[in-house]
Image (cartoon, rainbow, N blue to C red):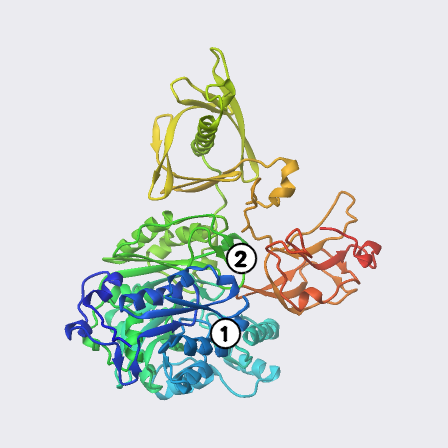
Amino acid sequence: MAAVILTVSALQGLRPFPQKLSWTKRGARLISGEAGRIEKVLIANRGEIACRVMRTAKRMGLRSVAVYSEADRHSMHVAMADEAYHIGPPPSQQSYLSMEKVLEVAKKSGAHAVHPGYGFLSENTEFAEACKQEGIIFVGPPSSAIRDMGIKSTSKHIMSAAGVPIIGGYHGNDQSNERLQTEAARIGYPVMIKAVRGGGGKGMRIARSESDFLEQLESARREARKSFNDDVMLVEKFVEDPRHVEVQVFGDMHGNAVYLFERDCSVQRRHQKIIEEAPGPGISPEVRRRLGEAAVRAAKAVNYVGAGTVEFIMDAQHNFYFMEMNTRLQVEHPVSEMITGTDLVEWQLRVAAGERLPLLQDDIVLNGHSFEARIYAEDPNNDFLPGAGPLLHLSTPPADQHTRIETGVREGDEVSVHYDPMIAKLVVWGDDRSAALKKLRYCLRQYNIVGLNTNIDFLLSLSGHREFEAGNVTTSFIPQHYADLFPSPRMPSTETVCQAALGLVLQDRKHTASFTQSASEPDAPFGSSAGFRNNIQFSRTMTLQLGDKKVKVSVTYNSDGSYTMQIDDDVYHVTGDVEQEAGATFLHCSVNGVKSRPKLVILDNSVHLFSMEGSCEVSTPVPKFLRAVSGGGAQGGAVAPMTGTIEKVNYLSDASNRCPPQIRDQLWFLCSQVLVKPGDKVAAGDPLMVMIAMKMEVTHTHTHTLFLSNRVTSDHFTRTCPLFTSCPDHPDGFSKLIKMSRFPRDPECILGNTLI
C-alpha cells in the first residue's frame, strides 16, 4: 500500500491558537511506529464521536471505515466514511456491542486499527485482547490496564499503593445484602453505592439512610447488570456537595506519561455530565500541579498507553480523592484540546502505532478557558426525560477557530430511540473564563432546534446563573438552585405575538403569490388571500395558541403594505418582510417602531421565533376534525405529526369515571422489573414497574388507589415495543402497559375491552 504522509496542516482545524508540535518540527512522517503502520482505521462507534475521529483521520490522510446498525443506515457518520458496513439491527447488543461483527468488518475491510470511541466496546477487555490476537491495532490502552482500572475495587488498591489519595469504603468480595448494609452503617450515611465495573453515571446510587439502602442497592444492581453484565458493588462514603474534577492524561509505549490539566465536570443531572469546563474554576496552580502529578502516578501504575481520564472528588478545601479512571477518550475531551492546542485523536492514532508522545510535560502550556455544553433531546421540566424524533429544523452558530460543534446529526435526521439522546456538543474557547462563558451563551442562543424538546433553554439558564458565573459549582448545583434554573414559564409579550402573526401573514402572502403565478387567470379576484374589496380594507382574525392560552389577533391589511394588529384593547402598527441568509429565514419587522430580526421557522401549525432575547413557540389551534390526523400531541401538526413530545404516563378517563386508566408510554422501553401482580391493590405513590429507555432507568408510580386488572400479562414486559412510532398492533403509537380498575374485578378490565 502507498505510504500515508502527514502534512503540517493536519492539526490546524482544532486549535484555538497556533502551537507547533514536535511531530511537525521533525517534518512529515509516516503514521507508523514500533506497533505497526496505520493507513486505514475502523471506527467502532456511531454518532458524533465517529464523525470526530473521521475528521482527524481524513486530515491525516487515513481512510476511515464505518459500521452501522439498521437504525443508522442514513446517518451522518456513514456518509462521512470512506467505507461503511452494516452490522445488524438497532439494538446495541446485536450491532455496536457485537465484537465478532466488528472484528469481521475490520478484517474484511483491511483496517489496520480499530478506534472504539467512547462507550460501547471502548472499555471492553475482551475486545482489546481480541484485536491484538487478530493482529489489529486497538487504539486504546492495553487490556490489562482496562481490566485493572475497570474494576473499581481493584483500582482502589492499585491507586492506594501508588500514593494516589482514595476515599474510605468497602471493596470486598462478600456481596450479600447484609454485609453491604453492615459496611454502609460502619462507614456512616450517606453512602455511594457503585458498580465496580461502572462508568458514565450508570450503576450508581446514593443511600442517605438505612431505610432506603436496600432499595438503592437493588436499583444499582439492576442497572449494572443491564449496562455491564456485572452487578458486583462497592460502598463508599458520599462526600456532600463535592466537585467532580478530572485530569486528562496520556501515555505512550516508551514509559512516558503527561497530564493536560484538569476539567471541572461538577454540574450533572442523573449522575451524568451536562456542562464541562477547563481548567477548573478557582483551582490554584499548586493544587493543579498536585492533581496532575497524582493522575500521572495513576497512569504509570498500570503502564497506561493512550488517552485516559483520572477522575477525582474534590471537597470545599480542595482536598481530592481518586474516584475512577476512564480508559478511553472522554466525551468532554475537546475542552482539553482547546486550552492546550492539541488534537488528542491524532495523539491516540500515533501513539497506538508506537510513536512517542509529541510533547514533554514542560512543553504543554495552558492557554485560556473552554466550555463544553451537551445538547440533548430531553425534557428538563420532566426530570430530564430523554426524547427522540426528527430534527425538523436545525441551525447552529457558525464554527470558527474558537467555536466547535461536535455532532453526528443533520437537519432532517432522527434522534434515535435506541441510543443516547445527545444531539451535539457545543465547545467554545475564550481568553479567560468570563469571555468563554459569554461566548457560550451567545452560541447557545444561535443553536435553534424544532421538532423535539431539547435542553438548550436550560443550558442558558444554568450558564447565566450568578453562582455558576462565580465558579461556585458542585455536583449538587442543579438541585440546590432548582427554583432559579426552572422558573415558571413566561408568556410571550404581545409584541412577540405580533411578530408570529406577521410571519403567518407573510407566509400566506408567499403561498398566494405562488398560486397566482400558476393560475390560469392570475388577475382574478380570487387569486389573493385578501379576496376582492372595493375601497374597503381587508381584515382577518387569527387565533393563536400560547401554551394553554388562546389569543385573538385582529389583522388589518393597510394599502401601504403595513398591518394594524389589535390584541384585546392594544393596537400595534406592524411592518416587515422575510429574507433568507445562510439557509435560515429571518423576519425583518417593526412593531410600533421597535425593530427586530428574529429567526423564523414555520412548520405545520406552529411558528417558532429565535432571537438573542430568547425563543418562542406559537401555534394555531388544530380543528377537532383534524386532531386524529395530527396525533393530538403538543407538538403535533395538522398536516404531518411532529413527534418529540414525551408523554411519560397518561391516564385514561371519561365522564362516567368507569373507564379504567391505563399506563401507556410514548418511548421505546424495556421493562426490567414488574413490581406488582394481577389483583394487587395499588396505593398512590406505589412503584409499578422499572423500565429502561435510552440509557435511563425510570420507575413508574401511580397517583390513585386502584386495583390491577386480572388481564395483566407479561407480553410488554419481555420485549421492546415501538411506542414512539406507529406499528400494526399499536396504530396510535402507544402501547398498553398496565390496566387499572377503581374496583376489584371490574368486568371491563377483566375482558380488556377498554380502548386508548
Please tell me which residue lies in front, 242 or 99.
99
Q: How far is mark 1 from mark 2, CA to CA? A: 29 Å
Residue 446 in sight here: yes
| Residue 681 relative to residue 559: left or right | right
Q: Earlier in the sequence, mark 1 or mark 2?
A: 1
Residue name at image x 71 percent, y 66 percent: 715
Can you give x and y, in whole percent of width and height, for residue 157 in the image? 42, 87
Q: Nearer the viewer, mark 1 or mark 2?
A: 1
Residue 151 in sight here: no
| Residue labelled with disc 2 | 383
Secondary-structure class at tag 2 = loop
Please tell me which residue lies in front, 195 or 419.
419
- Report the amino acid beneath label 1: Leu
Q: Which mark is residue 142?
A: none
| Residue 15 relative to residue 485: left or right | left
Q: Is mark 1 in CB contact (under 8 Å) with mark 2?
A: no
Dividing the picture into quadrants, the one containing residue 340 is bottom left
| Residue 152 relative to residue 370: left or right | right
- Report the amino acid beneath label 2: Asp
User: Residue furthest toward the top?
Assistant: 535
Can you give x and y, in whole percent of width and height, for residue 122 in the image? 42, 75
Give the answer, above or below, for where 537 lies relative to 111.
above
Can you give x and y, in whole percent of width and height, for residue 285 in the image? 24, 70
Residue name at image x 68 percent, y 52 percent: 651
Give the answer, above or below, for where 390 lies relative to 524.
below
| Residue labelled with disc 1 | 97
Can you give x and y, in whole percent of width and height, for residue 391 in the image? 47, 51
Secondary-structure class at tag 1 = loop
Residue name at image x 31 percent, y 75 percent: 39
Q: Badge 2: few (under 14), some or many (20 or more) residues near its Cα, within 10 Å?
A: few
Dividing the picture into quadrants, the one containing residue 336 is bottom left
